Image (cartoon, helix red, strand yellow):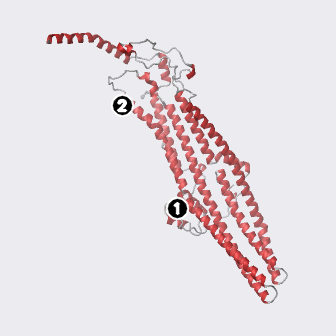
Amino acid sequence: MNTRIAWAAAAVLLSAAPALAGYSELSKEIEGYQPPALYRSQVARYPFADNTGAVADDFEAQVAMLRESSARWEKSLSAPAVEESFLLPEPAQLARLKDAASDNAAAEKTLSDGFALADLETLALLRNPGVASKERDVRAAIEGYSQAENLDTILRRYSAFTASLMTGIGPMDSPEAMARSRFPFPGVLALKGEVVTMETTAARENLEAARRKAVTSVDKAYRELIYVGEARKNTESMLDLLDNLKGAATARYSAGETSFQDVLKIGIEREKMKEELRTIGEMGRNAEAMIRETLALPPSIRIGAPVSDNVEVAVPELGDLQSMALAGRQELRSMRAMVGKMEKMLLMQETMVHPGFSLNLSQYDRDEVSRIGAGGMGEEKGSFPTTTVASVGEGLPKAPMFGTQVAYLRELRQRIEGLRADLRMEEAATLLGVRNAWFALDKAGREEALYGDRVVTLSRSALEASNQGYSAGKVMFADVIESYRGWLEANLAFARSRADRSIALADLEDRVGKRIAPADKR
């Protein structure tokens, strides 16, 4: 029995020896296989994944460029350029207000009586939550550079670690036979970097728009506070004048030279002025609330009276302002960056579905060895394709998800056209906004000149003349009261026009996206 088993084992070994020898020769042949010369020439021009050759150099160069772009964006946050910033405070001012950026008590001390506009604007940049939120968005977008390289870097490291392993299990394909699995190559990595750059650019423009809105908001509130102070001063002066007039009217009434109605009318006007003072006070509290909202301050923080600084500006030409707005307004620049991002994404997707360096007529995934035995039983088919289906494009893989006209690419093109239409609509709205802001600035400037140069002076002369005439009994009391009202209205209108001019200037800068230099610096 043992002899029979031994003879059977020997027979099996003898019969298997030729098969083992054939497999060894086939393995050596596969390991020594070289692609055709044409294929090698194309791979030499456009290599896929040779970690020691030109592709490695190109890949590392792209990675270095991504890291350099990331560092450049980080630097732009810590040290922004003047031409890219709506407002860039002085370093000394930033250092002086550093504590007020997080300490409410320090901020309240800064905003005590006599605070300057520059301090308020700097606090808006340091404390506004909207600015902080958009800055976080920029930092999040910058992280996209490392994400763009991480996947490819991991895959390449995995390939390097496993390149020398021979497990002996599974098909023994040539490395070049799986060239498609090495995709994407450095060119696509560069497109990924451009996508991240466009997204970061859009986020950076949104950050600058948030800064601009914060500065514009406190500018308007600051001008309202100045107007409130001047209006209160003029109204209190009106009360003093009415008190003097009441004394004169009472003396004339005692002498029988006028009726008691004159005294009553003065009392009515005084009550009106007191109510006007209360209204002016509430206007001031509204402006203070605007400042607290922008600076994220609690209601208990007191806002003092600002220092008046009437800055003269020359109204620029409307055409120049509109050109500046179209080129520099942050919302438009952000939308253009988003259009660019979508275009880069479309280009990357088209690159990944476009045909490669051959028509795929000499590349196949089947293992001819599998035809031996049961795997080869069945219909014989040629090793190489002989036809190309025109419906999927010449040389493209025969799969419904590939091609230049697939559904998600058509969707992406439609979204790009939608963004372009939104951009055109926003450009038109920007031109209209600049036109309206320019008109408001021009109108306020003309009204300020009208009241400041003529109306206030004439109303003061009319008031003095009516007082003298009333004391002499030559002017009716109704004319005296009218002259008092005219004087107050002229002074209030002058103060209002000055505030409106500054507010219109801030609104115009908001529409243009750029500060307008004072007249002496133009």
Q: Residue at x 38, y 32 (%)?
A: 158
Instruction: Tell me, yes or no, whether the two marked residues, 2 and 1, touch with CB atoms within 8 Å.
Output: no
Q: Position of residue 28 (x, y in %)?
A: 34, 16
Q: Residue at x 64, y 52 (%)?
A: 514
Q: Which residue, given by chain and number where applicable, does mark 2 sit on?
A: 161
Determine the secondary structure under disc 1. Answer: loop
Residue 231 in view here? yes
Q: Position of residue 468 (x, y in %)?
A: 81, 81
Numbered disc total: 2
Distance between the alpha carbons at the discs numbered 2 and 1: 54 Å
Residue 306 in view here? no
Q: Residue at x 58, y 54 (%)?
A: 88
Q: Amino acid at mark 2?
A: Phe
Furthest residue in direction bottom, as rendered: 255
Rendered view: 405 above or below 512 = above
Q: Amino acid at mark 1?
A: Leu
Q: Position of residue 5 (x, y in %)?
A: 17, 12
Asked whether, in this view, residue 217 is left or right of residue 106, the answer is: right
Quadrant location, the C terminus? bottom right
Furthest residue in direction right, as rendered: 474
Rendered view: 57 above or below 2 = below
Q: Position of residue 159 (x, y in %)?
A: 39, 30
Determine the secondary structure under disc 2. Answer: helix
Could you say which is closer to the camera, residue 498 or residue 167?
Answer: 167
Graded by Cα atoms within 10 Å as few (under 14), some (14 to 19) or many (20 or more), the crowding at tag 2 reads few
Asked whether, in this view, residue 12 is left or right of residue 393, the answer is: left
Q: Earlier in the sequence, mark 2 or mark 1?
A: 1
Q: Which residue, given by chain and number where applicable, does mark 1 sit on?
A: 97
Quadrant location, the N terminus? top left
Rendered view: 246 above or below 212 = below
Could you say which is closer to the camera, residue 365 or residue 28?
Answer: 365
